[in-house]
Image: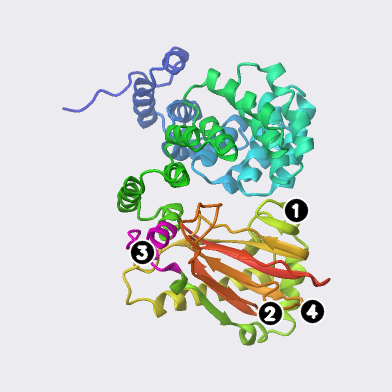
Amino acid sequence: MKKAKPSGSQFAQSDAQALVMLVQSGKHKEAQAKARKWIKRFPDNPFLYDVLSKSQIAVGDYSGAIKPLRKLLELQPGYADGQFNLALAHMNLNQPSESAELLEKIVAAGGGSADVFTNLGAAYFEMERYDEAISNYEKALEKDPKYVPALRNIGAGLRQLRRNEEALKHLEKVPFIAPLFAPGHLSLGITYSKLDMMDKARKCFETTLKLEPENREAHYEMGVLFAQAGDHKRAMASFERVDTAEARVKVLEHMHATGDQPDKLLSAVSELNTAEPKNLRAAAFSAFVANQYEVEETHSFAPNPLEFVSIRNIRDVLDEQPNYLNQLMKEAENVSAVWENNTTRGGFQTHGNLFHRGEALGQLEDIIRSHLKAYREERSGGTAGIIWHFPKQFDMDGWHVKLMKAGYQKPHIHTRGWVSGVLYLKIPKDTKDNEGAIAFSLHGYGYRKEHENIPVLEHRPTAGDLVLFPSSLFHHTIPFESDEDRQCIAFDVLPV
């Protein structure tokens, strides 16, 4: 039986009001069904696509909203509300560059409201273009100095650039403007924590949890505070409330830190490894535990991870283009960098994907991809997950690190990656012994040791060395006393 078509030869005002009432009353399925029926009858009516897309966005169907929004803008170019909603849909689909392009059009047409500038800042924040993000948040605050989303977001942007004191000035306003806004208390607490104001940080996290008892990020931050205080049992309890891939491993790390029930720990590690073969923090901890308790490794990502370190010099490839190495350094140094005091100590590090910031850097991505292919092929006979499940599609994220005299990097892993690597651009000449070396180990994050017999692989690099290794493998650098700087480009393979 054929479905009845809407009656009448034109779309009446009463029909439009009925659709709007359905959306406003939250009857989105009914609104979408009726809008689609009307569209069959009147396929060039922009109002129908507007209502349909707004109803889809209201229920979180961002993917479904893309097509009607594009049709809406085809019928009504320059419609700011449609551009904004399409930008919102792209942001929620993790497509910030598409979102930024649409929001820039609204601004160019004179429609730069506080909301538009805040969302434009958020798009640039997701692209790790923090200076541009902050600039747009500032424009939002010029429109409305008490606009809470902009205040919160500018604090997050400044925090990324290690400008924590500036972030604090903005974030301390939020609880007074919106005392029941839990994310404001949370962001303020994180900033207090960055400034080592732990009592104030804890109060902010406790307030967040009073307002939102299941706020996972607040539970995570409380777990971090308990861990810093050496209260491993309360840290475990907090991380259990978080239930993310990282937090599930942190529970086991603190179980190990107590030294209690090693058999229960090993059983829990094995169970997690089976359930989460791509959890790289689990892979790192599992390799350490296997070494410390002298048991068989149960994580399949990169068993015996030191065997997956590859060191090769590609200076001959770089020298095929005259002055290419110097051009790489020039482009890398032109990117805004921040003086780091976290994993990197005594040095500068860029933010945002370096491979998108210059012609020579773009060429370098192609060179590295060819060596990643060779890296995989050289190990193609094995069954390790790092090779067996190597992502067919992946992005590359790169950053420039410049260490100064006495600079170094603490032991760390890259849990977002798959394979990580470093290309060395410049190495200080006046160094002794292992100064400036990169070191790989199974130990990191202050894990309690059962014994000191932990294998370590050190490499003193030269310019043109390309080092590839599992992203789950702890690595650090050894301080050097030379007055010359040490420069490299680090990168991660990010599975798509």
Place of residue 86 in the rendered image (x, y in percent of width and height, measured from the top left): 54, 37
* Residue 76 visible to the viewer: no
Q: Which residue is mark 4?
A: 430
Q: CA distance from mark 3 to mark 1?
A: 35 Å
Q: CA distance from mark 1 to mark 4?
A: 26 Å
Q: Which residue is mark 3?
A: 385
Q: Amino acid at mark 3?
A: Gly
* Foreground residue among 476 and 20: 476
Callout 2: SS: loop
* Residue 90 vertical placement versus 37 (above, below): below
Q: Which residue is mark 1?
A: 338
Q: CA distance from mark 2 to mark 4?
A: 14 Å
Q: Earlier in the sequence, mark 3 or mark 4?
A: 3
Q: How is the image coloured?
A: rainbow
Residue density around tag 2, few if under 14, some if 14–19, many if 20 or more, within 10 Å? some
* Foreground residue among 273 and 330: 273
Place of residue 310 in the rendered image (x, y in percent of width and height, measured from the top left): 50, 76
Which region shows up in magenta?
288-305
